[in-house]
Image (spheres, grey):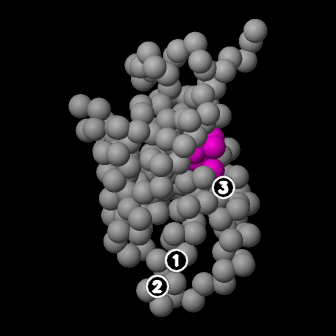
Amino acid sequence: MKYAVAAILAWAFAVLDASAMPYLHPLGVSPDLVLILAACWAIVRGHNEAMIVVPICAVMQDLTTSDPFGTSLLALAPIVPIAVAVRLRAIESDFLPAIATVMGASLCYGVISMMVLGATGQEIAVSHALFRVVLSSIVINALFTPLIFLPMHWISPPPPAWLRGSTRLRSSA
């Protein structure tokens, strides 16, 4: 059931990304809701579920973009390792790891997409793409993360016991 919900959410966000988000472009880029969904799922629900949900999100995004099919699958693939790496630093909140994962995933997505599009023969101004598109998308995706993270965090079951142990850093003494 959870994977059906993930597929429906990924499809809805992919359609929203393709239809409405191009009209919302602060800093010259549109937020990537599918990327944010996949990264938040990896943090809130764990990397085991994310290994299934991230490819679902990637396929849904590939179906709604004009990029070569498989580009999103390659570009979203680093989300799970990034989420696992961010989880190694144990802190009380899941929000900061989610922001860090979205930022890292946005960087990887932009760089891998540029590499794929360059490999298909499209001309890319690398400095412009890195500084005007990738860096802007890192900021915008991080700013839009609470819109997806908070509802997902509220409706998800509590984390497993090994994530709630006494070894985690706490913000209060």
Q: At x 61% / y 33%, what residue is drawn?
A: 89
> In the rendered image, which quarter is residue 156 located in?
top left
> In the rendered image, which quarter is residue 123 located in?
bottom right
Q: What secondary structure is found at the residue carrying circle 2?
A: helix
Q: Nearer the viewer, mark 3 or mark 2?
A: 2
The part of the chain drawn in magenta is 99-103
Q: What secondary structure is found at the residue carrying circle 1?
A: helix
- Circle 3 packing at 10 Å, graded few (<14), some (14-19), many (20+), is many
Q: What secondary structure is found at the residue carrying circle 3?
A: helix
Residue 162 spot, x, y in % from top left: 46, 20
Distance from disc 1 to disc 2, alpha carbons, whole Å, reads 6 Å
Label drawn at residue 138: 3
Q: Nearer the viewer, mark 1 or mark 3?
A: 1
Which residue has dot 2 on it?
119
Quarter of the picture holding the N terminus: top left
Which residue has dot 1 on it?
115
For the question of whether residue 23 can be seen, the reply is no
Residue 160 spot, x, y in % from top left: 42, 19
Q: Per the image, is 86 magenta?
A: no
Q: Tag 1: residue type? A: Met
Q: At x 47% / y 55%, what residue is drawn?
A: 78
Please say if the residues under marks 1 and 2 sit with CB atoms less than 8 Å apart: yes
